Image (cartoon, rainbow, N blue to C red):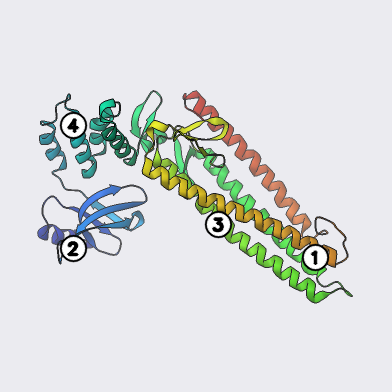
Amino acid sequence: MSRFLAALMLALAASPAAADLVSTTDGFVLEGKILEENDQFVLLEVTRVHGGEKVKTRIERARVVKLLRSMDAEANYQERRKLAPAGDWQANFALGTWCAEQGLRARAVEHLVPIFGLEFAKAEAEQARSIVLRLGYRKYPDSGWLPEEEFWQSRGFVIFREAWMTQESAQATEAYEAAWGAWEEASIENQRKSLQSLAEVPEKDEEKLAELVGAWELIVAEDRKKALTCDQSALQTLRALRRAGALTGSMEDLGEVELQANGAVVGPGGRVLIEASLVDRALLMEFNALAANWAKAEAAREELAEAARATVSEILALAGHGEEEEAPAGPDDEKVAELERRLAEADAKLEAARTAMKEKLRADGLPK
């Protein structure tokens, strides 16, 4: 008997029939109620043994071996549905909310979407929209409300860097990032060797030059840290955007996103990425905060770049190279030039893949 089955039998023997069970990679079987499940984590509400207090615990998806939901949710729904006729919006709102809590996503959407247009129940309509969006459903042209992953996967798209794109575009993006990383590392190392050679110029203030090169090293190291922060902020911001509302495109161009006064989120060329009427307000606040952090990280990198340029100019001047803006040739210039050529090739392939993806979106009648 497997460890999971043994633990599961013990859990079932000691738990009420309606409990959800989550088996983890470290051999535990947690009992409770699954509040949310996605490709990143499972949110489980459990009851403490002592005191009976209900608490929420987040389990990373990578730790989850198996989920076992209570088997009576659908049967319970069928009984509740008898008490929610089509014309009773309040009963359907309550039923849709209950379905969402039970993890019955499609059932929840079925009962909540008709409430969206009720002018006399704006608060409930807004809440219904928020629930549907949090369940991962989006409204798509000619397709209505569908799970985001179902819509894009049916068209051959994959999630890469928190954006939906074609497999070809994802591969081209990965290749470009690898080429950029190799070129950037080689360029920095080449400049480092060049500046170090300047610091060893006879009859110059070698101590001061060494101090300046050391300062440049610190600036570069800090910029590398900030670069990671910017990348992480970009992904977090995009994740918040995807969770906050009805994205209508592949969201590959995050750099020019702006929030309009009416609540709509607009991308490059004024393309509406999230309609104002379909925005989850709480998650939009999260997006605003993350976008602000991202902007701060980018601004900090600009300051570091200016400091690096000023330091290099000071080194050049002290070493007798006048007011040149760039350091003299480095020992690895040929290597850097070759990597720059590869980077240009990767960039061209990426652009071709993006163009092909936009044509695919256009053929499907979707915003790009």
Q: Give the label on residue 90, or none.
A: 4
Q: Categorize mark 1 by other alpha carbons within 10 Å: few (<14), some (14-19), many (20+).
A: many
Between disc 3 and disc 4, the foreground one is: 4
Q: Could you classify mark 4 by the number of other residues whose Cα lies within 10 Å: few (under 14), some (14-19), or many (20 or more)?
A: some
Q: Would you name the residue on which mark 2 appears?
A: 48
Query: Quick one: 35 or 25, which is closer to the camera?
Result: 35
Nearer the N terminus, badge 1 or badge 3?
A: 3
Contact between marks 2 and 3 (CB within 8 A): the answer is no
Residue 220 image-quadrant placement: bottom right
Q: Position of residue 58 (x, y in %)?
A: 31, 56
Residue shown at 18% from the left, 60% from the top: 53
Q: Is tag 4's residue or tag 2's residue first in the polypeptide sequence?
A: 2
Using residue 271 as the reference point, say whether residue 344 is left or right of it.
right
Give me the residue at 26% from left, 34% from top: 124
- 364 or 275: which is nearer to us? 275
Q: Which residue is mark 1?
A: 315
Number of other residues with Cα within 10 Å of mark 3, as a class: few under 14, some 14 to 19, many 20 or more: few
Tell me whether the residue at label 4 lies in contact with that at label 1, contact meaning CB atoms closer than 8 angstroms.
no
Q: CA distance from mark 1 to mark 2?
A: 64 Å
